[in-house]
Amino acid sequence: MSTVIDPLNPMLMIKSVKSLVLITTTTLISLLTNAQLKLPAINGIGNDVKKVILDYPNRFINLMGEIITENAQSTDYACNFKVNGAEEVIITRYSAKKEVCSWEAVMLTTENFEKAKQKFKALFNQLNNLAVNMGTGPNYHLKGKYEPPTDASKFTSVLFTFDPENEEIKKLRVELVMQYYAPMDRKVKILVYDRDREDDERGNTREEE
């Protein structure tokens, strides 16, 4: 049933126009809200870790920037792309073994335990179940078991493995670390490295008194 507008009644015309504007505005807001809800979540650090994993078969050669330090057993390089939210990123290649390498991103340095704990949990949520495709088969998902840090612990770690296993990257490890550094700092880091490394080749993850 259509509404008949009386041209002799201007107030009725004004009310009708206002009603149409209100309906149109409400519809547009609803459409925009639904569109926003359907947008994929932005996972910056997840995409960056994917990039590192995908270059693992090349031993991170495509990610290496300028040399930072050279030691007898290893060489540290800057990462040649900006890692979302990272304070510092270092790629290390070890000369003692064939093409053994590691990638380390310091995501937070703070004296506040609660801030470090929140960051640790947030990064776990981004990395856990992260899908990676090596281009030769199905998606592989990072899987880790969350361990909540405690104020008394100096070192907390979540080690991620690939599900299902992938022969091409079976020696690759992704690890999330929260570590205490004297006198008061805590660092939250993401590590991507060769399983074949010795304990002293694991980057700066050892406890410091």
Image (tube, rainbow, N blue to C red):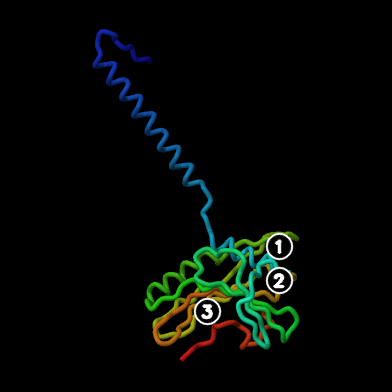
Q: Is residue 32 positioned above or below 77 on the image? A: above
Extreme residue toward the top, this view: 8
Name the spot of residue 20 as percent of width and height, x first.
35, 24
Q: Is residue 145 visible?
A: no
Which percent across, then down, holds residue 129? 58, 64
Apparent side of residue 53 relative to residue 187 in the rendered image (left or right): right
Q: Amino acid at mark 3?
A: Ser
Q: Secondary structure at mark 3?
A: strand
Q: Is residue 209 left or right of residue 77?
A: left
Residue occupied by mark 1? 134
- Of the residues under marks 3 and 1, which one precedes in the sequence? 1
Q: Residues within 10 Å of mark 1 (few under 14, many from 20)?
A: some
Q: Amino acid at mark 1?
A: Met
Asked if residue 48 can be seen in this view, the reply is: yes
Q: Secondary structure at mark 1?
A: loop
Tell me residue 104's x, y (percent): 58, 75
What percent of the width, then of the height, locates residue 89? 56, 72
In the image, what residue occupies the spot 59% across and 61% down? 47
